[in-house]
Image: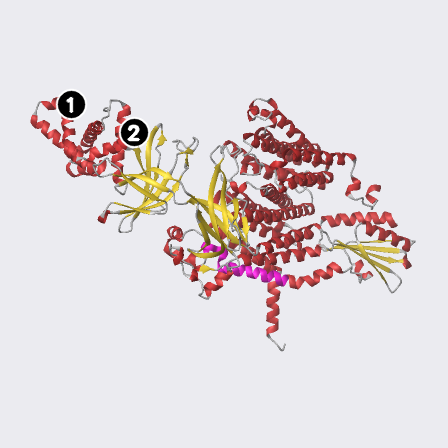
Amino acid sequence: MSNLLDYQQKPLLQQLGWQDWLYAVILLIGAVFAFTKYAHYMDAYEVGFLFGTAMLSSYMGWRWRALAKLVLAVGLVSLIAVSLYQGSLERVSQVFFLKFLIASQSAIMWMNVLFFLAMATYWLALYRRSAFTANVASSLTWVAVFFGFVGLMVRWYESYLIAPEVGHIPVSNLYEVFVLFCLITALLYLHYEQKLNTKQLGGFVLLVINAAVGFILWYTFDREAHGIQPLVPALQSYWMKIHVPANFVGYGAFSLAAMVALAYLLAAKGILASRLPSLDVLDDLMYKAIAVGFAFFTIATILGAMWAAEAWGGYWSWDPKETWALIVWLNYAAWLHLRMVKGLRGPTLAWWSLIGLLITTFAFLGVNMFLSGLHSYGTL
Amino acid sequence: MQNPKLPLIKNLFDLLSSMRFAVSLLSILGVASIIGTVLKQNEPYENYIVKFGQFWFGLFETLGLYDVYHSGWFLVILLFLVISTSFCIYRNTPMMLREWRTFKEHATEKSLHAFSHQATFHQVADTEGAKQKLLGFLAAKGFQYKIRQQADGSELVAAKAGTHQRWGYIFTHVAMVVILFGGLLDGNLPFKIQELLGQKRIETLDIPLSQVPAESRMSTGNPSFRGNMTLPEGASSNVAFIRVRDGYLVQELPFAVALKDFRIEHYATGQPKSFESDLLIIDPALKEPITKTISVNHPLTYKGIAIYQSDFQDGGTELNFNVWNLFSPNNQAQNLTGAIFDKAKLGDGDKALSVEFNDFRKFNIINLSPDGKGKPHNVGPNVTYKLRDNRGQAIEYVTYMQPMQIDGKFYFISGMRETVQDEFRYLRIPADDDLSLQEFMNFRATMLDATQYEKIARKIADSSLDMNKDKTIRTQFETSIVRLLSVFAEGGYNQVARMIEEYVPEAERETSAATYIKMINIAAYEAYNLSLAQQKKPPLGQGTEVEMRLRESLNAFSDMFFYGVPYYLQLEQFEHKEASGLQLTKSPGQKWVYLGSVLLVLGIFAMMYIRERRIWFYLKPSENQVHFAMASNRKNLDFEQEFDLYRNQLTSLIS
């Protein structure tokens, strides 16, 4: 209590303990190691991204300790996986740990399974009002995220094993970005779960994540589209490394907002109301998620425009994907206007953000399915 | 009320600058944008006519739906958005700046008591000491403050934090105007105005560059454009073509671009890995031409004009064909040479056909497995051409150079279609053991050669023992074979079917058809052997292989009557020449758009992540009390939590 009443706030850097510094140093060493080993494959921008990522991960880990643990665990296990490969892709079927646990396909399958279990557990916790079960669900989600990131990291490495010229960051096709989507949405949720100290929303948010998991499974088993494909010339650019992740922070946050909106609408009708956080909290979380999503979606769209100017000869070509990105942007811009300027609250905005998810999904998936254009990297 | 117009103008101003209007505009813009994603934009106009029919085509054209984003009405929406946003900025900026600057130190004690978030601390003995503590508190929380003495000896401390948030409003809205301004700079507004004034018009005819009139040319002074240039290897050009609706404009460039070499590199799997063009920029202002290789994602900018690798096509590949006249009993092929985009002539007189060579593709990745599950692979080059008669009717053909392996056998494949909307229908000719067409062509020539029919008939009669007994039966038999062969030579199985329908009573048709097919097969066997003998090759043996070969040869023979023209063009040799598709853009608005984008991001972060909060302390020494009030322009959970925290901290600080 005395701590809370002491109004003097220390700046972030003075709050850091030795563990925080150690974490940052480990990341920096990792970045320097990667730089010394692979600098000649990278252009100036990519070197910037490398060190930028190290610094950003340090900062985010300082602000959110759990994330720091995740980063270290993912880094460690990915390095183990890399060492188990010994430079040969064949070993994926020979080494036990790779085959059943941490080869990219296996790790992503674990992610799928764990996300499903986490969802079931979150709902069970909600039903039984059990804090312990909710903690288990939360842990399952963390482990799912861990496996997902290991899967992507190992996939990145595997792509270079196919051939050095084929290697690329795994954000280049629908399969890969769906995994990314699951991870980012889950991380955003976990962040708010910790911040708001409420685990009741997990079941809702994991609904949308599990929808993506379903897609990944269908895409893997029915379409066999999980293989690593070389990049078409248009995608061979450092821009992909920032444009795509920024976009998916946007998509993830919008999806999170829509799921919170769903909880809000149910609670407003008295369904599950006693088990869910108060409407004010839900409303606030919905706003925060859309605010984050909007900021990142704006950045992503601008980065996309800059990339388009370099690849297609114009920053804006009214390509269907671009146009739908604009529509999504306009939609949330209107949402924010009404809330921030008019002070609108309540079910209207909740319905709107739920419907917003349909628009976002169409922009993300429908455009690839139904419309053709320059963004035809992920056809179904 | 002297000027009755004023309220109207004011009302209009209020409407245009209102948020309701702005949000409506955003919605309209969103919906209008959807049109262009559903209806494929900038297609050739014939496609739209075929899709919608003449009536709807005309209506949609009037509405500008084939290029929505450059249509007049779409630009008007954007213009209104600029106006609305500008008015909004004009109307709200002074208030925003005031809010940004002010400490609101004129608040009265009474008004502070009316706040929803407030608290009074009583029994503060040492108000001066408390004041110092409070100022320390404000500083620690990042508040700036101003102190105002009141008439009754009280003091008001007015503090603010996060008022930079107000800049967020200004930045985001100015950003919109700047981005739209940049976009308008890069639009084709100058051309649109000139077109309205009748100074410029688009050219819709496919005519040589030198004949394009001045009114369809844009000078080098054109501030912004996005054009295309197709350069064959070894060629150069100093104009780009701008596609507008169903026509084009010629954009003159202040320099010439030459293509030295174009390269496509492939991954091991066959997918393209890179497209590269070695360019030469030739400018009189330069002592030496600039040499630069461009590729996708790596354009070259010179004199404000950016040159992009956009696509590629054939650059006039030279072709050498063997041409067979399918309906002549001649098995010799003639030679024909040509090049892509060139024309050639086949035949003479009224029946002469003009050949238009349209495209050559060196690699064709096709999935030939019957269930579609096998791996696609390269089946080699093909050539697309049109054969046009003297009435202008044309049939389009696509012919593959090498035989394709289907179910373990090799076939020469050539597709034909009469209109672009049709699917290609394929003629499939079995390849011989040397993987050539010659054996089929020999067989075909024999089948068409009426002088050979008697010989064939005699051979069949010889090998059939019963026939030798009776001379009249034998003669009858031979005559019927000769007749059957000449009918078959006139139109294949179809012609035979027609003959049956004409002469055979309905009840007997099925049996006689079976007999005829059997006889044709037997005759074809003899004809095949005859053609082989002419080439001094051993005759066919027996077995399913041979039956299959015969059946397929007969099918191909029969199908060639549906091939549309009497010529089969077989590509023998080619000299591949590629052309690089470049895109050239001049985009003066780009820097404005980027500037606007930076403002937009700064603005959004300022608006959403800087929280404006105000605190007032009303220190009343006379009553030993301090009144605390707090306000924010946005009421949300964070603010509630912060207020509670501050109240508790202040209580422990000064009580």
Q: Residue at x 38, y 58 (%)?
A: B211
The foreground one among B612 and B303 is B303
How far across and how far down the image is residue A40, in percent? 61, 36
Q: Earlier along the polypeptide chain: callout 2 or callout 1?
A: 2
The foreground one among B139 and B211 is B211
Asked which secondary structure carries label 1, the reply is helix
Q: Quadrant of the N terminus of chain B?
A: bottom right
Give the side of residue A175 with respect to residue A53, left or right: left
Tags 2 and 1 in contact by the CB under 8 Å rule?
Answer: no
Name the disc covering residue B35, or none. Answer: none
The colour scheme used here is secondary structure
Q: Is residue A146 above or below residue A355?
A: above
Residue B77 located within the stretch drawn in magenta:
yes
Residue B350 located within the stretch drawn in magenta:
no
The answer to whether one can see residue A186 in this image is: yes
Q: Chain of mark 1?
A: B
The foreground one among B473 and B17 is B473
How far across and how far down the image is residue B107, in percent? 80, 61
Name the disc covering residue B432, or none. Answer: 2
Quick one: which residue is furthest to the right in this view?
B125
Q: Quadrant of residue A143?
A: top right
Name the amino acid, label 2. Answer: Asp
Q: Is residue B480 above or below residue A281?
A: above
Residue highlighted by disc 1? B463
Magenta range: B65-88
Q: Residue at x 52, y 61 (%)?
A: B76
Q: Chain of mark 2?
A: B
Q: Is residue B79 above or below residue A373?
A: below
